[in-house]
Image (spheres, grey):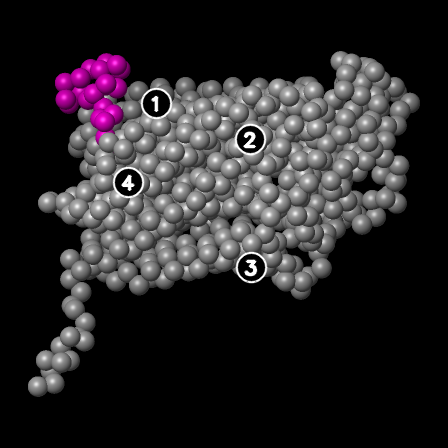
Amino acid sequence: MHLHRLERIWLTFGVAILAIFLATVTTAALVDGFVPPSHVQSIDPAKVSVTPPFDKPGLHKLANGSYEAYYVAHIFAFDPHHLVVPLGAHVTFYVTSLDVVHGFSIPETGVNTMVTPGWVSTVSHTFRTRGTYLLVCNEYCGIEHQTMADTIEVR
Amino acid sequence: MSTTNLGMFEPRPLTRELAVANENILVSAHIYTATAALVLGALFGLLQGFARANWIVMPAWFDYYRVLTTHGVLMALVFTTFFITGLLTFSTYRSIPRVRHVALGWTGYIVMLVGTLVTALTILSGNATVLYTFYAPLKAHPAFYIGATVLVAGTWFVAADVLMNVAWFLKNNPGKRIPLPAFAAAATFVMWIIATIGVTLEMCLLIPWSLGWTSGIDVELTRMLFWYFGHPLVYFWIMAAYLIWYNVIPTTYKGKVFSDALTRLSFILLLVLSTPVGLHHQFLDPGISAGWKWMHTVLTYGVVIPSFMTAFAIFASFEIAARRAGKRGFVATIRWLPWGDPVFSGSALGMLLFLFGGFGGIVNTSYSMDVLVHNTMWIVGHFHVTVGGPVALSFIGAAYRLVPAITGRKLFAPKLALAQTYTYFVGMLLMSTSMHVAGLLGSPRRTSDVTYFGAAGAQSWHFEMVTAAVGGTILFISILMFAVVAVGTRFRDVRAEERDEFAFAGTDEEAMHTPAILDKLGRWACLALVLAVVAYAGPIHDQLSQPHYLVPGMRTW
C-alpha cells in the first residue's frame, strides 16, 4: 500500500517523536532507576498487625544511614500518625492496606503509589526541604475518604 | 365476508421503505436514551464541581461519592455506549441498504436499557457507591454488578446485528469492499467484543462474591481484568468519534474521505492495539513488575500511530476540498470551513480539544512520569478533554445531523445548536485546564473536599477548583441548550419539506487502491487476541505464582 509523500513525512516525524520519548523514559529507568513503584511482594491482609515489620509501623534507621518507614493504611487513616523525619533523610516507604484499596501520595514530591490489600507497595524519597508535608489517600476508599490524610514533618 | 375483517391483521409486507422507518425508530431510541443520560450526568457533574469548589456540601442522604458514581457511570458507560450503539447501527444500516428486520437490534436496545435501569437504581439508592471503576474489595449490592453485566450483554446483541449485516453484504456482494461506514462500525464492535471479555471475566468473580457464594476476592486480578477492559473502552469512544470524523464531517464541506485504504488501516490498528495497553492505568500498582509496565508503555505509544494517521487524513480532506473551492494556504483553508454549521463545529472544536487530550495522554503513558499525575486532578482533566471533549462534542454535533435525518423533523433552534458547540468548547477548555493545573499542584481526584482541614499544601488547589466549577457551569448550561434542541426537535415536530437523504462522505476518486487484506476482520481479530494474551499472560502468571490472598468484601460508605 502506498502512502502519500507528505503522510510519510508526517508519520516518520510522529514515530520519531515517540521513539525519542521511549528512549528518554527507558534511559531514565535503566540509568537513574526512575521506574514506577512496582514492588512484587504479597502479604496476608488479615495478619498485617502480626507480620513484622508492619506490626510496628513507623520510621526505622538502617545501618547505612538511610531510613525505612512502614505504613499501614486502613479506613480512614494512616498508621503511624505524624511521622517525623530528619532533614536530608532518604526514606523508603513500605505501605500495605488492612481493608480496601487506598492511595499513598505526598503532593509535590514523587511519592505516589497505590496500596492494595494483599500486597506491599514501596516508594522512596529524599526529604531535602524542612517543613510539614501533607500525606493523602488519593484513591476513593469510602464515605470519609476525604479525611484520610496525615502529615510528615521534616526537621 | 370475513376476509375484510382479517385484512387488518395481516402483516404489512416488509418493504425497504418500512424497513427504513423501523431502522430510524430504533436508532432514535438509542440517541434519545443517550441524550437523557448525558443531561442527567451533567447535573451530577455540576454538583461535584460545586462541592469541590466548596460552594455546597452534599447532604449525607445523597453524598458526594454517590453523585460521583452516578456521574461516572452515566457518562462513561451509559451516554457513550447508547450513542455509539445507535451510531454504529445507523452507519451499518444506511451503508448496507436492504429490506431487513430489526428485531435483533431492538433486543439489544431493550437488554441494554434494562441493565442500565437496574444499575442506575442500585447506585441512586446508595447501594453501590463504588465509583465507575468498582474496585474490589468495595462491595456493592449484587444488582449493581448484574445490571452492568446486562448492559454489556445488550451491546453484544447490537454488535451481532451489525456483524450479521456485514456478513450478509459480503455473501451477496462477492468481491466487493465492505462500505466504509459499515466497516468502521464492524471493526469498532470487534474491538469492543474483545475488550468486554475482560470485564465479563471480572464479573464472573464479582457476582458470586457479592452474592456471598465466595468469601474473598483477588483484588489485583480484578483490577487487571478491569483495565484490560477499561482502556479499550476509551478506544470504543474514540473509534466512534473517528467514524464521524472520517465519514460524516466531510459532507459538511462537500469534501471526501481522504483515503479509503488508510481509513481502514487506522481502524485495523485501533482494533489490534487497543487492548494490550491496560497496564498503563496500573503503573503505580504493586504486584506488577516494572518490565511488564514498560512493555505496555511501548504498546500504548503504538496505539498513538492511528491517531497520527487520522489527524493527517482529516486535514488532508479539509485541504483538498478547500483547494477544489479555490482556497489555498492554511488560513484560507481554515476560514473556508463551515464554522457556522453545528455538525462541523462540534467535531472540529472537539478535534482542537483532542490536541490537549493527546499531549496529556502521552504524559500519562510515559512510564515513570505517571507518578507525577496518577490519581491527581490531571487525570480528571485528561479524560474530560478526551471523552468529555472530542468524543462527546462530536457525538452532540453528529446528533444535529442524525436526528433530523432519522425523524424527518427540522432541527429546532439551529442557532442555539451552533452556540451550544462553542459554549461547550469554552466550558470544557476552562474546566479541563483548571483540572490539569490542579493535578500538577498535587490535588488528588475522587475526593469530596480537598481542603484537608486547612493544610498548607492544600490551599493552592482552591483557585483551580473554583475555575473548574465555573467551567463546569458553562458546560452544564451548554448541555441544557443541547437538551432544548433535542427535545424541541421532537416535540415541536416540524416536518421538513424535503427529507434529509443522509449520505456518508464518498472516497476521493484519486485515492489509492485498497488491499483486500484490510477487510479480513476475522484475521485482525485473531491478531488482536494474540497480542492481548501476550500482553497479559506474563503479569497474570507472575501474580498467581506469588502467594496471594483473597480479601473479604467491605461496604465502607
> Camera-side residue: B65 or A13?
B65
User: Magenta segment, which residues?
Assistant: B322-342
What is the spatial separation of the Cα atoms under label 3 and label 2, in whole angstroms? Answer: 34 Å
The residue shown at (50%, 27%) is B468
Q: Is residue B276 above or below residue A151?
A: below
Q: Secondary structure at mark 4?
A: helix
Mark toward the start of the polypeptide (2 vs 4): 2
Q: Percent x, y for residue A29?
A: 65, 23
> Camera-side residue: B544 or B332?
B332
Q: Secondary structure at mark 1?
A: helix
Q: Residues within 10 Å of mark 1 (few under 14, many from 20)?
A: few
- Reading the image, the residue beneath label 1 is A8
What is the spatial separation of the Cα atoms under label 2 and label 1, in whole angstroms? Answer: 52 Å
Nearest to the eye among marks 3 and 2: give it: 2
**Given the image, on which type of amino acid does mark 4 rest?**
Val
Residues at marks 2 and 4 on the same chain:
yes
Q: Residues within 10 Å of mark 3 (few under 14, many from 20)?
A: many
Q: Is residue B291 above or below residue B166?
A: above
Residue B461 sits in which quadrant?
top right
- Reading the image, the residue beneath label 4 is B485
| Tag 3 subunit | B
Nearest to the eye among marks 2 and 1: give it: 2
